[in-house]
Amino acid sequence: MGKAYKVYRVDYLTKMKIPIGTITERRSKPRGPESHFGLMKLARQTFAQSPEDRMRIVVGEEQVL
């Protein structure tokens, strides 16, 4: 099983991150810090409800399962 990351929707008015789900990656090798963009893109495609909402979706820390 891959690593799971929390996905948040950021409310920029209140400066709060609201958890909306998780993304699980299936890579066998660890992801470098600069290659989290692919994971962010997948989260935005999965959880965004509108084009404006895509910029509010962020990937958080890795969850320990």
Image (tube, grey):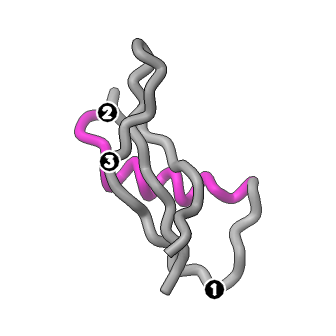
Q: Position of residue 12 (x, y in %)?
A: 44, 18
Is residue 60 placed above or below 62 in the rendered structure?
above
Look at discs 1 and 2 and give the one toward the viewer: 1
Q: Residue furthest top?
A: 13
Along the line of sight, the residue nearer the viewer: 51 or 62:
62
* Mark 2 element type: loop
* Mark 3 element type: strand
| Amino acid at the residue labelled 3 | Ile
| Amino acid at the residue labelled 2 | Pro
Along the line of sight, the residue nearer the viewer: 26 or 1:
1
- Identify the residue under disc 2: 51
- Identify the residue under disc 1: 28
| Amino acid at the residue labelled 1 | Ser
Mark 3 vs mark 2: which is more N-terminal? 3
- Identify the residue under disc 3: 20
Left or right placement of residue 25 versus residue 45 in this view: right
Asked if residue 43 lies in the magenta stretch, the reply is: yes
Is residue 26 placed above or below 54 in the rendered structure?
below
Separation (CA) of disc 1 from disc 2: 31 Å
Asked if residue 44 lies in the magenta stretch, the reply is: yes
Q: Residue at x 70, y 68 (%)?
A: 31
Numbered range of the magenta stretch: 34-51
Q: Quadrant of residue 62?
A: bottom right
